[in-house]
Image: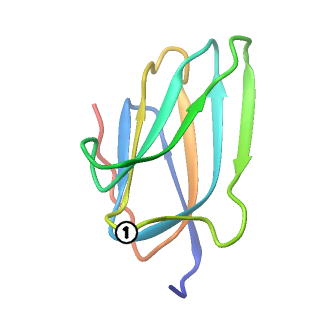
Amino acid sequence: MESDVRSLSFTSSSATVTPRSRLQAIYYVHAASADLTFSNGSGGGTTLLELTAPSAIGTETVYVPGRGLLFGGGIHVTSSSTTNIPSVTLFYEGEKKKRNGN
């Protein structure tokens, strides 16, 4: 897949990037412990990555090694708490982006 790195920031409980994409990095703000779940295609898709935010206030940057983590059906990310993880930015390689969330 040859394309530019794109980004998507969201403050809702979930977001989806379509179509096929490679996740390359994640930046998020946290106020307390909570989980981010990255699934292939949809919330019911195969979970490819789970992150747990530390319990203290702060920010985290996660870099995915190599060419990134391939999501053949698109990236679907869900936050277990928008209070504890109020902001997430994804960096990915793909063709277009689509937002949806609660």
Q: Is residue 17 above or below residue 37?
A: below
- Tell me, what colour scheme is on the image? rainbow
Vertical relation: 12 (above or below) 96: above
At 39% across and 31% down in the image, what residue appears? 12
Viewer-closest of 32 and 101: 32
Quadrant of image for the C terminus: top left
Residue 22 placement, left or right of 97 = right
Q: Position of residue 44 (x, y in %)?
A: 24, 43
Residue at (27%, 49%) from the top-left corner?
Answer: 42
Q: Measuring from the top left, give residue 82's x and y in whole percent.
A: 45, 21
> In the image, what residue occupies the spot 73% across and 34% down?
60
The residue carrying pointer 1 sits among few (fewer than 14), some (14 to 19) or many (20 or more) residues within 10 Å by Cα, namely few
Q: Which residue is mark 1?
A: 72
Dot 1 falls on a residue whose secondary structure is: loop
Q: Where's residue 36, x and y in %?
A: 50, 33
| Residue at the bottom extreme of this rendering | 2
Amino acid type, label 1: Gly
Residue 8 relative to residue 29: left or right = left
Which of the 4 image quadrants contains residue 65? bottom right
Q: Position of residue 2 (x, y in %)?
A: 54, 88
Q: Residue at x 51, y 25 (%)?
A: 35
